[in-house]
Image (cartoon, rainbow, N blue to C red):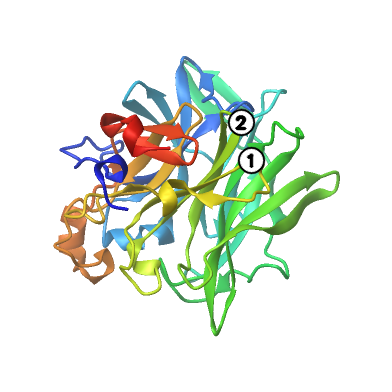
Amino acid sequence: MENPATTAPAIGPTVRVLPHHDVWDTWPVQEEDGSTAVIGGAELWMALSAPAVGHPEERHDHARIRLLARTADRWRDLGHAFADGASPGSREWSGSAVRRPDGTVSVFYTATGVRGEARPTFHQRVVEARPRPRVFDGVVQLDRDVEHRVVLRADSQYLPADEVVGGPGRIKAFRDPSWFRDPADGREYLLVAASVPWHDRFMGAIALARATKDGWALLPPLVVADGINHELERPHVIVHQSRYYLFFCTNRHVFHPADSAPTGLYGFVAPALAGPYEPLNGSGLVIQNPPARPDQAYAWLLLPNLRVESFVNYPFTGGSGPQHIAPEAARTRFGGTAAPTLDLVLYEAGTALAHTYDHRHVG
C-alpha cells in the first residue's frame, strides 16, 4: 500500500535534542484523558538516552530514561528521570507515564537485564515508579526516593523474555508498556509488546493487561502476527470518534521474510478495546519511511490530538541494515534526535498524512 497518503516526507537537517547523547523513543507525561501534562510552564516528556559514542545499535545496552521539558519544538534537558541504580534492571527501556489525581506520576517502563550484571542480558519486565514532580527554580525534577516495583511479567500465555544473549530484532519481547483508560468501562489497561510461540521460533504479539485490586492481570493478546512478524513494538491505542485505533511500530528486518514489508507505523481499528480489529488502509500500513530512505525514522507514537512523534534513525544507510554498517560510518549516519512532528488524519478505517489528505484516499 505504498502511496503518498502513507509515506512520510524526507527529513531535512535536524538539531540534536542533547548534543552529546542519543535520544530516541520519546513519550509525553500524559493526563488521564490522554492530553500532554504541562508542569512548570512546559510539556513534560520522557525519552531513552545514551552517550553518543560507539555503534548506535549498542545504545540499547546503556539506555536510561531522560526527563525533558518541551515548549513548541524546543527541548530542555532535565537529566535522568531516576536516580542511578534505582531500576531493578541494568538499563531502562521504553514505557509511558500518566499523572494521577494526587499529583504523582505513574511511570511504567521496561526494566531490562539485572542490576549489577557484568554484561547486559535481555530479561524484560514491566516496572512502575510513582514519583511526584516538583519545580525548583523553574526546573522540574522527579522525587528520587520512590519504589520501583515489578508489576507485570510474561505468564503462560506469553513467552518469557529472558535471553542472556541477543540484540535488536533478535530477542523475545515483553516491553514498552503503554497505559490506557478505557472510557467504556473506566478501567485501566496496559498494552505490552510481547512474544508468543510460532513453530520452532516466536512471533510478535500485543499483550493486554487489566488493573485489578490485586495488581495487573494479563489477558489474551489483541493482535498476533502469525508467521508475519516477530516484533510489534511500542503498542498504543487512542479513541477517536468512538472507534478504538490500535498502533504499533515494526522494522522491515523482522518480517517473515525480511524486507517483505516496510519499516513503519501500523494500525488496526475496532468498535471496542477487545476488538474485533481490522487493518487500517486495508493493509495495516499507516506511515512508512520514503522508499529511498527505508530506515529514516522509527518509534512513531500517535497522540490523541493526532500528532505523530518519532525519532531520526538512519536517514541514509545505502540500503544496508544499520547493524551491518561499521561503527564509525554508522555513527556519522545516525540521527539520534527527535524527528519533525507529523499530523495524521483518521477516517473510519482509513488514514492519511495531513499534507496528502484527500477524502478520495481514505475511508
- The answer to whether mark 1 and mark 2 are in CB contact below 8 A is yes
212 up-or-down from 357: above or below: below
- Which residue in the protein does label 1 denote? 271
Query: In which quadrant of the rendered view does residue 301 lie?
Result: top left
Direction from residue 31 to residue 282 in the image, left or right: left
Q: Which residue is drawn at 47% across and 63% down?
A: 231
Q: Which residue is drawn at 33% across and 68% down?
A: 260
Percent across and percent down for residue 288 are 31, 50
Residue type, numbered disc 1: Pro
Label 2 neighbourhood size at 10 Å, few (<14), some (14-19), many (20+)? few
- Which residue in the protein does label 2 denote? 242
Q: SS for tag 2?
A: loop
Query: In which quadrant of the rendered view does residue 83 lie?
Result: top right
N-term mark: 1 or 2: 2
Q: SS for tag 1?
A: loop
Label 1 neighbourhood size at 10 Å, few (<14), some (14-19), many (20+)? some
Residue type, numbered disc 2: Ser
Percent across and percent down for residue 186 are 75, 32
Percent across and percent down for residue 125 are 63, 59
138 up-or-down from 44: above or below: above
Q: Residue at x 39, y 35 (%)?
A: 308
124 up-or-down from 28: above or below: below
Direction from residue 35 to residue 359 in the image, left or right: left
Q: Quick one: which residue is furthest to the bottom in this view?
A: 200
Whether residue 95 appears in this view of the structure is no
Q: Which of 19 and 330 is in front in this view?
A: 330
**Quick one: quadrant of the C terminus?**
top left
